[in-house]
Image: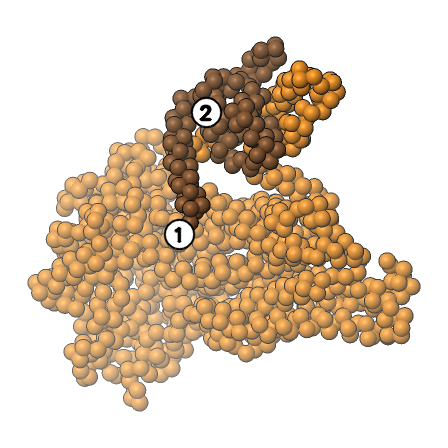
Chain colours: A brown, B orange
Amino acid sequence: MPGDKSEILQGTLDLMVLKTLDGLGPMHGYGIARRIEQISEEALQINQGTIYASLVRLMQKGWISAAWGTSDNNRKAKFYSITKAGRKQLHTEAQNWERISTVIGRVLRIAERG
Amino acid sequence: MFVWIRTLASRTRTWFSSRHVAHDFDHELQTHLDLLTDENVRRGMAPEEAKRAARVRLGGLTQLKETNRELQGLPFIETFLQDTRYAFRMLGKNPGFTAVAILTLAVGIGANTAIFSVVYAVLLKPLPFTNPDRLFTAFQTNKQQGVAETGCSYLNFEEWRAQNHVFSEMAGNVAHQLTLTGRVEPTVVNTSVVTPEFFALLDVKPIAGRIFFPQDGKQGAPPVVLVSEDLWRGRFGADPKIIGTSINLDQRPFTVIGIIPSAFRTPFFTTKQEVWIPLVQDPVFSTRMPQRGSHLLPVIGRLKPGVSVAQAQAEMDAISGRLAAEFPAENNGWTVRLVPLQKEIVGDVRAALLVLLGAVGLVLLIACANIANLLLARATSRSKEIAVRTALGAGSARIIRQLLSETAVLGLLGGAVGIALAYGGVKALSALVPSSLPQMNPIRVDYFVLGFALLLSAIAGVAFGLVPAMFAAKADIQSSLRESVRTGESRNRRRARSFLAAGEISLALVLLVAAGLLLRSFSKLMSVSPGFDVQYIVKADISLPQFQYSKPQQWTAFSDELLARIQSDPGLQDSAIAVPRPIADLRVTLPFDIVGSPPVSASGAAPRTTSYVSISPGYFHVMSIPLLSGRLFDRRDIMSSPSVTIISKTMAQRNFPNQDPLGKQITFGFPPAPGAMHEIVGIVGDVRDDSLSQDPRPMVYVPYAQAPFWGANVVVKSTLSPSSVAATIRQEVQKIDKDLPVTDVAMMPDLIAASVAQPRFRTFLLGLFGAMALMLAATGVFGVISYSVSRRTNEIGIRVALGASRGTILRMVLRETLVLTFAGLAVGLPCALAGSRLLGNMLFGVSASDPATLAIVAITLAAVAALAGYVPARRAMLVDPMVALRHE
């Protein structure tokens, strides 16, 4: 449902940021935000600023690191990349996520049938 | 998972470089905006439009920055710092209020800290020995003879030490005085006589040389001595070569083997010990080492690790049983009692110190109530500020936090000033503390005491801040904003203020009743007659060296000559000898039997005991102790004539009810003649020989000529100055023997004063706290009433304008005061009664619920409170209605 702003749980956003960085390598905040919007086929119209809270949290936990660099069109930007600890965390979280979503999916199907 | 630690570390790091981080983030957001704008332009927007859309897409910049700052830093600390800064500003704006609050609190915390430093040093701080909780004293007790605590004989001590498996070490320790001569002027030194294990047991390290080794305690070992650091510095000029040299004690050479540090305090003895010698070398006590029946040595022991007190007690019981079976004559009925060393040292000081601590705690409580009251008053004037804050979105938790920060700052400032006061207070206290107070640890403000003071100020800050803060947070914004600040004060708040002031009166009553009871006890104590004339009596002690004066004949010869010489001096005819003298540290108590009545020991009841004093014939005359019947001692009572005794009135009444004791025979005496027969030849008045607070004990007097000691305590009645009396005595003593020192010259009134030093100390302090409480409570009442008057200026003006007389206004305000006061008194009275019961045996001649004391204290308190209320009442009375009505 485009236009409908989905409420994204904090943890979910963090997970998506991690996944993005894991898949595409070092990116700046704008890039990450764009990427998440594209992947979700614009279903997640986030306030792009929200991404920064997520980035700070992940930095503090040591799951991502940051360095200043230059963007494609020659602008100074902060580039984030996933750390080893971050990968490990992503792995665990992703598994958890899948298990939960399977369970929830099943519950919802049962509910529909009943 | 240490993710939270990493998070905290990261937050702390960024918090310290917050400016840099913020700048970084600004830059990052700018890049983001630029990139978004670029993209929008690519999609075909106009540049301005593209910029606007980018802003929308990113979200509110300020909000983002705010979120980022909160995430990056330590928000809790930040608000705390902010609150603290604000608190300082608020306190600075009201210098009057701030000064009063800080001073009040400082006095409370200072007094508490000072008293706590004493309590800590005496009661709480572990003794300054290694593993002090393993140290115990072992006393002998005898239920049949009514002896609670006494030392044991050396022979028994050896058995204890050899047979027990529960103590890693045991040592005996007894003290007296010896005469130091040789390299220095003759002087008497406090001497601890110990078994050689003593220092090893307490783990004392000498400054130089060594401590005693076991061979130093063997018969025939060369005499050795340990000297204290103070003696070494004071008497021997800190001679670095003192070790190995020889000093004379009672005219006998001892080799110095070590120096004991000044900080070391010998357990049990409140006076500072100056030299230590092995028991086997002591001129007095070594002669008693072979006597199994003596009760010479108080013993301390160090419990082995893992051994419980019960196990140790069981083992010592078994050993006493064996000793009683083996040596029934000396050991029958005697058992061993183990007491933790610290408990033994502290003794009965504990109760008095705890009462003082409780009292000073009440003072602080009153101080807090006072400040809470001030804060409540101020909170009323600040209600508008609080309301504005609330209206702007501050939650009540946030408001409470801010107000509490203010009071916490106030508390800590008060604490800081209080600690400064405490340093002075501790100095004053140390000078006041009676020398009989056992001080194993020095009394000072150390880290522990400082910690206590800080904790106290923090608690105080919250205690007096919480109520006003809660009131402020609960306030109704609408009415606060609308209400004119000058007029209304919420009813609840006013009730709280009155409640606090009444509470102060209650607490003050508790303290003042206790102080009043102690004061009355003390004045009763001081008006007790000791049974002898105190005025103009000077006493001096002379102890005879054992080696020169070893035979009783020499003692009598010396004392006869001395007395004759002193009495030949025109001002000193009234002089006599008494051992022990009255109000002495030492008391001789002996069991006795009456010839012709069955011995008490046979019936199994507690034996009769009596105090024992050996005197020269003129003693009763010098001391003005009245002869009630019979005769006094005279020159006929000498060693070769029949033994005689004079008994005290109490002795006569208790043991010879409805009979004439004159001519009767009683048996008492020291070993080797414990059953020596004495004929009663006279009865004299009672004497409080122990202390003023103790009822006179039964006493027997014997002629010095028949029962000489190895020393002489001279008592002189003279109108000459004590120093000239002392000089004469010294002169005469030195004419007989130039190596004899005269010590402890003192006037009897001073000795009496010293004997009541502890009651005086606690009475003085509690009186001081009572006065502080009275003052604080008066300030509290004054504050409440004058505030209420200033609030009601308007109302009073209207009343006067409508025709109320000045008298009516005065009565109205005074009534408010009195209601408050009597409510406080009513609540305080039962508390005071309960509190004074804690004073227990600190009271003398006054009951804990003494109605006179209660009445006087209550009236005083009411009068002071009324006075405190009268001042603002007068101001209210003089209000000019015109001014008052224009007041708004």
Residue at numbered disc 1: B124
| As drawn, B735 above or below B647 | above
**Quadrant (top left/top right/bottom left/bottom right) for the N terminus of chain B:** top left
- Disc 2 crowd, CA 10 A, few/some/many (<14, 14-19, 20+): some
Could you tell me the amino acid type at mark 1?
Answer: Leu
The label number, if any, that marks residue A19 in the structure image: 2
- Along the horizontal axis of the image, is B735 left or right of B324? right
Could you tell me the amino acid type at mark 2?
Answer: Lys
Estimate the x, y position of residue B715 in percent, counting from the top left. 40, 63
Estimate the x, y position of residue B25 in percent, counting from the top left. 61, 23
Residue extending furthest toward the front = A113
| As drawn, B267 above or below A32 | below
- Along the horizontal axis of the image, is B281 left or right of B759? left
Q: Element type at marker 1?
A: helix
Residue at 63 percent across and 41 percent down: it is B84
Q: Is residue B665 visible?
A: yes
Estimate the x, y position of residue B209 in percent, counting from the top left. 27, 34
Q: Is residue B378 visible?
A: no
| As drawn, B694 above or below B60 | below
Instruction: Respond whether the residues carrying marks 1 and 2 are from the same subunit.
Output: no
Q: Element type at marker 2?
A: helix
Q: Nearer the viewer, residue B853 or B562?
A: B853
Tally of marks: 2
Residue at 48 percent across and 34 percent down: it is A11
Q: Nearer the viewer, residue A105 or A96?
A: A105
Tell me the CA gap for discs 1 and 2. 61 Å
- Disc 1 crowd, CA 10 A, few/some/many (<14, 14-19, 20+): few
